[in-house]
Amino acid sequence: MNKSVAALGLVLAHLCNTSWGSEPGQDLFEQRCVGCHMINGAGSEAVKAPNLTGLSQAYLQRQLQHFRADVRGDDARDAEGQMMRAMATSLGDDEIKQLSQYVSSLPRQPAPKPERSAGFTGRGLYSGCTSCHGAQAEGFDELGAPRLAGQHGWYLKAQLLKFRAGLRGAHADDKFGQQMRAMASAIRDDAAIDTLVSHIGSLVGE
Ligand code: HEC
Ligand code: HEC
């Protein structure tokens, strides 16, 4: 083997170690989360698991802590929340940190855009959400408000219904959830929820 081939081998070996060598968060994610959230984090409607890509580390970490501490997903009527809570109960603090670090580093996988635009009504309704979630639904970490752009419409709708019915955001320790619950309770009716969700689906999140 000549020298340059050997050097190339070394470079390749180094690249393999850095780009494909698994970090703890990645291992955990692949062992415990991909069955529902998929290997790229984009989620799965079949099991009602949301898209995790594009969410901030702070938000992901808080949700995992809340599931683990029965602050979210504790209501017997919340089947999906209970499923996710069961996944979080065995996680240690370090594991939650590593998972949220890893998941927040995944490339964004935006859900397909809705076919129909919600037009003027959608924009009007969404104007009540921009102060926290941002004009393009990009989210605002300082206020604890997650990115909504790129999330599946069926998940957004389910969460708005859960907040409204007190299945999420009702726990005394859920400061951010309580704020969002108040916002969801103010949404007029189910038709307005549908309009909001299709409007959010049209936003680019930048
Ligand atoms: C058995 C299926 C399943 C597995 C496995 C699973 N999840 Fe979930 N996850 C769900 C479902 C369903 C929801 C939606 C809960 C709801 O509707 O409130 C969810 C919600 C979440 C949320 C909240 C997202 C948001 O936008 O608020 C996070 C974060 C999350 N999962 C992370 C994880 C991580 C990390 C793992 C691996 C440790 C994992 N999940 C494993 C099914 C699963
Ligand atoms: C006062 C600030 C505020 C306003 C205004 C607000 N939200 Fe929120 N929203 C939040 C916070 C904070 C959270 C995170 C709650 C948590 O940590 O569980 C949230 C969470 C959500 C979620 C759950 C996302 C997920 O990934 O699970 C949806 C959906 C949502 N908001 C939609 C809306 C819509 C639609 C409006 C307008 C009608 C709105 N929000 C207005 C603060 C706000």
Image (cartoon, rainbow, N blue to C red):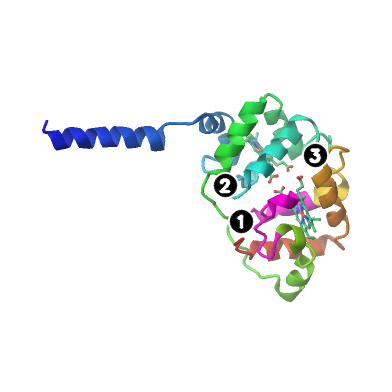
Residue 43 shown in magenta? no
Left or right: 34 with respect to 175?
left
Q: SS for tag 1?
A: loop
Q: Which residue is mark 1?
A: 150
Position above or below: 190 against 117: above
Indicate which disc, 3 or 2, sits on the residue closer to the N terminus: 2
Image x and y of residue 9, in percent? 23, 33
Q: Which mark is residue 184?
A: none
Q: SS for tag 3?
A: loop
Compute the Cα span from label 3 to label 1: 23 Å
Please, what is the three-letter code of the amino acid marked with disc 2?
Ala
Q: Is mark 3 within 8 Å of ligand 1?
A: yes
Image x and y of residue 141, in percent? 69, 50
Please, what is the three-letter code of the amino acid marked with disc 3?
Asp
Q: SS for tag 2?
A: loop
Compute the Cα span from label 3 to label 2: 22 Å
Q: Which residue is mark 3?
A: 78
Stretch of the chain drawn in magenta:
134-160
Q: Which residue is mark 2?
A: 42
Q: Kindly identify the residue that appears in the image at 63 percent across and 46 percent down.
A: 56
The crowd level at tag 2 (other Cα within 10 Å; few <14, some 14-19, many 20+) is many
Q: Which quadrant: the C terminus?
A: bottom right
